[in-house]
Image: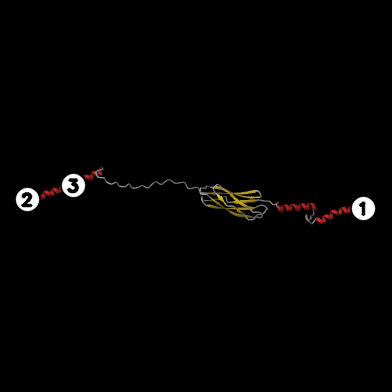
């Protein structure tokens, strides 16, 4: 064969090998696309990466600014978790409380994108507690989200003035004869009464004696 014909056949065989390889593997593990084998493989790897963990994680926590509490009781604080990212997941919420306080934990349901869930945290307040701020934490993939709530405890009323004792009646003193002006007056009255009685008796006796004398004379 002529050298020119041989060279032409070799060129055609060389050009046909990549096309045959693309036909065999283009719709396989890498897929096919308008940008060629390399670009198709890169796009599919990127999609696989997004599906396996390339989504965004972003949550927001919301709780009441304040709740009222009473020493020696418990209070329930609702905490709402909103998934603002593209990853689905659930969040376990714990509370940081002052010494002597206790709190439960709670886990949300599985939240997809733009979904929210509200869980209740029960906080136990000790007897000698004052107004305090609680912090609610949730950690997802190493990132911590927080929200705070103040438990307002009314101050104990200030003690009022001690009421004055009610006046007690002064007990009457027993009268002692001869003590004080009243005793002297009583003594005089008794003495005069006795003198009058004696005088009346004397006069009565004397009159009776005179009457007998007169009778005897007659």
- The x and y percentages for residue 216 are 5, 51
Q: Secondary structure at mark 1?
A: helix
Of the image marks 2 and 3, the number of the one nearer the N terminus: 3
Residue at image coords 71%, 53%:
52
CA gap, disc 2 and disc 3: 30 Å
Left or right: 27, with 97 as reference point: right
Query: In front: 196, or 74?
Result: 74
Q: Which of pointers 3 and 1 indicates the residue nearer the eye?
A: 1
Of the image marks 3 and 1, the number of the one nearer the N terminus: 1
Left or right: 19, with 151 as reference point: right
Q: Secondary structure at mark 3?
A: helix
- The x and y percentages for residue 192 are 19, 46
Q: Secondary structure at mark 2?
A: helix
Which residue is the site of mark 2? 214
Picture layout, residue 180 above or below residue 123: above
CA gap, disc 3 and disc 1: 182 Å
Numbered mark located on residue 194 in the image: 3
Of the image marks 1 and 2, the number of the one nearer the N terminus: 1
What is the residue that sits farthest to the right in this orientation? 2
Q: Which of pointers 1 and 2 indicates the residue nearer the eye?
A: 1
Which residue is the site of mark 1? 6
Cβ–Cβ below 8 Å for labels 1 and 2?
A: no
What is the residue that sits farthest to the top in this orientation? 180
Residue at image coords 73%, 53%:
48
Query: In front: 61, or 1?
Result: 1
Give the class, few, some or many, for how many residues have Cα within 10 Å of label 3's Cα (few <14, many ≥20). Answer: few
Give the class, few, some or many, for how many residues have Cα within 10 Å of label 2's Cα (few <14, many ≥20). Answer: few
């Amino acid at each position: 064969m002529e050298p020119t014909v041989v060279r032409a056949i070799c060129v055609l065989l060389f050009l046909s090998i990549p096309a045959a390889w693309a036909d065999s593997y283009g719709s396989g593990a890498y897929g096919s696309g308008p940008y060629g084998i390399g670009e198709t493989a890169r796009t599919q790897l990127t999609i696989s990466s997004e599906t396996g963990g390339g989504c965004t994680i972003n949550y927001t926590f919301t709780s009441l600014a304040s709740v009222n509490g009473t020493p020696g009781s418990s209070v329930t604080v609702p905490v709402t978790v909103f998934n603002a990212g593209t990853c689905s997941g659930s969040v376990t919420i714990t509370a940081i409380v002052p010494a002597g306080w206790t709190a439960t934990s709670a886990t949300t349901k599985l939240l997809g994108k733009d979904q929210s869930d509200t869980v209740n945290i029960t906080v136990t307040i000790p007897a000698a507690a004052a107004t305090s701020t609680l912090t609610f934490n949730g950690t997802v993939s190493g990132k911590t989200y927080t929200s705070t709530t103040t438990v307002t405890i009314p101050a104990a009323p200030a003690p009022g003035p001690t009421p004055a004792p009610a006046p007690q009646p002064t007990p009457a003193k027993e009268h002692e004869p001869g003590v004080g002006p009243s005793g002297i007056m009583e003594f005089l009255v008794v003495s005069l009464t006795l003198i009058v009685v004696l005088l009346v008796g004397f006069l009565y006796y004397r009159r009776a004696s005179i009457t007998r004398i007169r009778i005897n004379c007659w």
